[in-house]
């Protein structure tokens, strides 16, 4: 007798919205000011190396860049709203991230603040300078913070780890993709 397929799994209401997983990545450039509204009080930091381009450090004994003596350079990401509209993932240097954290240390909250960032040096990895401008009066209308991990993984060609519910789309042949 043929084995029955899995019993259908019901969910009340419409299927979950997979949401948008990849956002534009913005980072300050020299001679230009990037203005963003911070959405999250949290950052995601990633150890990297410069190898003609930024690549992640595996932080383990098999990291070829570590073996060849390349320094670890931390980069940090958080979700922001652009003053020009839309949302993005902000990428800054580890140093800039620590300074921003310090700036908001007393209040403990950075969500809703407008930050202007620029690079003073001649290259795109020069130190970042920033100023915290003012609290937006749109604070209550701010979009929710969102996960930046999927976007960052995608920078290096990694597919996101989909939550279980998003991988459970029924398929009639072919691969499931949300
Ligand atoms: Zn490494």
Image (cartoon, rainbow, N blue to C red):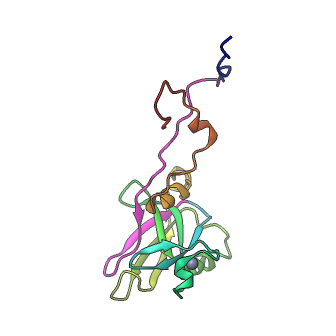
Residue 119 on the magenta span? no
The residue under the point 44% across, 74% down is: 54
Residue 123 quadrant:
bottom left
Q: From the image, which quarter does the N terminus lie in?
A: top right
Q: Nearer the viewer, residue 144 or 72?
A: 72
Q: Position of residue 102 (x, y in %)?
A: 63, 80
What's drawn in magenta, residue-wise? 11-39
Residue 25 spot, x, y in % from top left: 42, 63
* Horizontal side of residue 68 vs 31, given as left or right: right
Judge from the rendering whether residue 107 lies leftward or rightward of residue 20; answer left or right: right
Q: Is residue 51 above or below residue 88?
A: below
Q: Residue at x 47, y 72 (%)?
A: 55
> Can residue 72 be seen in the rendering of this structure?
no
Q: Nearer the viewer, residue 82 or 107?
A: 82
**Residue under the point 50% across and 42% down:** 19
Judge whether 73 appears above or below 83 on screen: below
Which one is nearer the viewer's eye here, 81 or 4? 4
**Image vertical order of residue 174 relative to residue 100, above or below:** above
Q: Residue furthest top?
A: 1
Q: Is residue 27 magenta?
A: yes
Q: Residue at x 39, y 82 (%)?
A: 119
């Amino acid at each position: 007798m043929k084995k029955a397929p899995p019993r259908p799994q019901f969910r009340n209401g419409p299927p979950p919205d997979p949401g948008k997983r990849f956002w534009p990545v913005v980072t300050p450039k020299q001679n230009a000011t990037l203005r963003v509204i911070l959405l999250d009080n949290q950052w995601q930091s990633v150890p990297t190396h410069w190898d003609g381009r930024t690549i992640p450090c595996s932080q383990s004994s098999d990291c070829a860049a570590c073996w060849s003596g390349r320094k670890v350079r931390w980069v940090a990401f958080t979700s922001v709203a652009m003053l020009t509209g839309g949302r993005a993932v902000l990428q800054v240097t580890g140093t800039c991230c620590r300074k921003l954290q310090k700036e908001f240390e007393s209040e403990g909250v950075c969500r809703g603040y407008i930050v202007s960032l620029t690079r003073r040096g001649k290259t795109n990895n020069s130190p970042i300078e920033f100023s915290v401008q003012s609290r937006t009066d749109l604070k209550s209308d701010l979009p929710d913070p969102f996960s930046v991990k999927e976007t960052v993984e995608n920078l290096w060609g990694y597919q996101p780890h989909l939550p279980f519910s998003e991988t459970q789309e029924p398929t009639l042949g072919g691969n499931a993709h949300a």
